[in-house]
Image (spheres, helix red, strand yellow):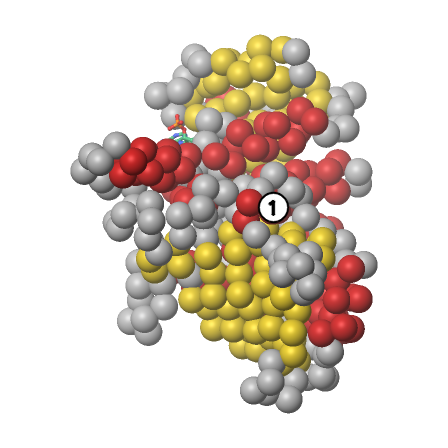
Amino acid sequence: MGLRIGIVGATGAVGQEALQLLELGALSIAEIRLFASVRSAGRVRSFRRETVRIEEISAERLAGLDYVFFSAGASISRQYAPAAVKGGAIVIDNSSAFRMAREIPLVVPEVNAKELGRHPGIIANPNCTAAILATAVWPLHQAAIVERIVVATYQAASGAGAKALAELDAQVRQYAAGEEIRRKVFPEQIAFNVFSHNTPVDDSGFNEEENKVAQEIRKIFGEPTLGVCATCIRVPVFRAHSEAVVLETRRKLSAEEAREILSHAPGVAVVDDRKANRFPTPLEAAGKREVLVGRLREDPSHPRALALFVSGDQLLKGAAWNAVQILELLAAG
Ligand code: A2P
């Protein structure tokens, strides 16, 4: 018997990726249901040679499904995920709504798939930056115990959704046409600019994205005291986040050993060609399920620190692919 799967936020940047991954995947799917706002209701998508009509979300319509992906923002998840669970589904939630709830597992399959053994009907998919960082750092943590992570990010426009992606495209065209550059989604111009992540800043000076990265990495690793200092930045890239990372480890890890470990690590591809000056780029990472890792070097300013550079597709490993991996693991029992 095939699975009955729903996607909430099916017209969004992540929802569209999830639909495509399911279409290409090997899961046996008896029924796919697509949900979005009233604005999209009635539009159609094709899935494995069938035409699927997008439905306006409602609690009643979510009943009778086996798995539902949520990717329409935290307030929609809070409002409707409990109804989907009540209606018999397991929810894989891509929003921040439940990530830090104690009873809800926050899962990157390469790191903590074992957490899928206990859940109350909802499983949280991590923040995109945290998922990419976790995939790259976990194998090194297992080898040498990471005590502190300092990370600066270079985050793509599409991390803020389909409208933000369109805004970067529109601003580049406006610039090329010599027109006034118009802002709507981002608070700053995204074309030809770099700015601090567009989430609220707290009293300590960290923005919400930076706090999410720190809290979520600690939860995914099961390391409540792990030190994390993040600086999250938006850059004018369409797709894939990059991260400049410095790790302080309990045991010294040479660049060579780290490269060897990462070359066998699940979900990771090493791109580290010093001679050719070829390292991870968001363009190369875009569309890939693996996280690219390179620029591995020992920090000369610290006896046990390692620097690296990571690029990962935040719509795939940072969101839809991680969620589909979770679904595939659950479906396999
Ligand atoms: P819609 O396209 O109908 O607005 P993104 O993260 O790319 O911005 O996508 C957000 C997703 O969440 C879209 O699929 C969007 O649907 C959906 N969404 C936004 N607001 C609502 C709502 N009130 N009810 C249901 N879906 C919503």
Where disc 1 sits, the SS reads helix
Which quadrant of the structure image shows residue 253? bottom right
Residue 148 horizontal/vertical position (percent): 57, 77
Residue drawn at the location 29% of the way across and 36% of the way down: 176
> Between 15 and 31, which is closer to the camera in this rendering?
15
How dense is the environment of label 1, judged by Cα within 10 Å: few (below 14), some, or many (20 and up)?
some
Q: In the figure, 81 relative to 220: above or below?
A: above
Whether residue 25 sits left or right of residue 228 in the image: it is right
Q: Quadrant of the N terminus?
A: top right
Judged from the image, the quadrant occupied by ligand 1 is: top left
**Is residue 189 in view?**
yes
> Between 255 and 16, which is closer to the camera in this rendering?
255
Q: In the figure, 107 relative to 75: above or below?
A: below
Residue drawn at the location 41% of the way across and 34% of the way down: 162
**Is residue 125 in view?**
no
Residue 285 horizontal/vertical position (percent): 60, 47
Residue drawn at the location 65% of the way across and 19% of the way down: 31
Residue drawn at the location 65% of the way across and 31% of the way down: 21
Instruction: Identify residue for label 1.
Output: 284
- Amino acid of disc 1: Glu
Whether residue 179 sits left or right of residue 269 in the image: it is left
Q: Quadrant of the C terminus?
A: top right
Residue 246 horizontal/vertical position (percent): 57, 73
